[in-house]
Image: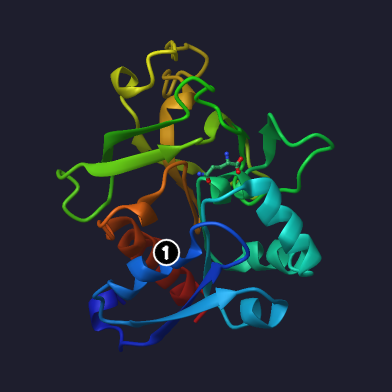
Amino acid sequence: MSDEQEPPRDLNVGILALQGAFAEHQVMLKKLNLRHRIVIILVRTQEDLAKCDALIIPGGESTTIALLARLAGLLDPLHEFKKTKPIWGTCAGAILLAESVENAKKGGQELLNAISISITRNGWGSQIESFEAPLEVEGLRESERPFHGIFIRAPVILSLNTSLTGEPIQIISRISTGLLPSSQTVVPTDEDDTDPRDPRTIVALKQGRHLLTTFHPELTKDNRFHEYFVTQCVIPSLRDHA
Ligand code: GLN
């Protein structure tokens, strides 16, 4: 059944609200104009999480978010959540979704291992840690119109790894190398025959029900990424569990 034929329903979308740009995500979700009603849940406890059909983990500081999640008793419930429900991580949230992280906090930092990638924190270097760039994004509404990517001490994807679940990774956006901070040299590699380009140029991807962006769609006025998450991850996942 296509979405058009389904009766409208309530979608309970949680936003992890421990630290970072959770309020900005809330504003963006409120602006969505879909057939289904979005019920926004600011998640701070296990009880909040239990009400959610999907979760957004905002940008902020991944080490702090992970620590606060542990203190709130949310880490184990989040590990369970990821097995059946969609999670979208933006920037710091993307780090939390990864399988492994470089440049982690001393002593290590906890990850949810929901998407089989390796990532490095603050990967675009200390010289220019923040920059903005227009992005082409596959599958976005009006995809010919570039999405304004805001990168703030952004993580960088180092490798796409094989997932235990066998879910393929779908690359939905790459930054063109000419738009990177000038201190960065991203060279094409020949390691992967199917896509020989450097994984560090990947800035948005989807694996199964989960979505990851290394930039901050919540800091723009453009809610097409929020719409993408709801229509491409949340609704299909609810349909699978219906
Ligand atoms: N550098 C931050 C971290 O490691 C992420 C920055 C951000 O979310 N804007 O968590």
User: How many numbered circles does the render carry?
Assistant: 1
Q: Quadrant of residue 222?
A: bottom left
Q: Is residue 148 left or right of residue 79?
A: left
Specify whether residue 112 is in view: no
Q: Quadrant of residue 146?
A: top left
Residue at coordinates 27% horizontally, 58% vertically from top-left? 224
Counting from the top left corner in percent of width and height, residue 30 is at: 33, 75
Q: Is residue 187 left or right of residue 175?
A: right
Which residue type does callout 1 highlight? His
Single out the residue that lies furthest toward the front: 127
Q: Which residue is mark 1?
A: 25
Where 48 sits versus 115, above or below? below
Counting from the top left corner in percent of width and height, residue 98 is at: 63, 43
- SS for dot 1: helix
Q: Quadrant of the N terminus?
A: bottom left
Cβ of mark 1 under 8 A from ligand 1? no
Residue at coordinates 19% horizontally, 47% vertically from top-left? 143
Which residue occupies the foreground of this view, 212 or 170? 212
Counting from the top left corner in percent of width and height, residue 149 is at: 33, 41
Q: Quadrant of ligand 1?
A: top right
Q: Quadrant of residue 197?
A: top left
Where 234 sits versus 57, above or below? below
Counting from the top left corner in percent of width and height, residue 105 is at: 74, 37
Residue at coordinates 25% horizontally, 45% vertically from top-left? 147
Residue at coordinates 44% horizontally, 75% vertically from top-left? 239
Where 182 sits versus 63, above or below? above
Where 45 sits versus 195, above or below? below
Which residue occupies the foreground of this view, 104 or 205? 104
Other-residue count near label 1 (Cα within 10 Å), few / some / many at <14 / 14–19 / ≥20: many
Q: Is residue 118 left or right of residue 36?
A: right
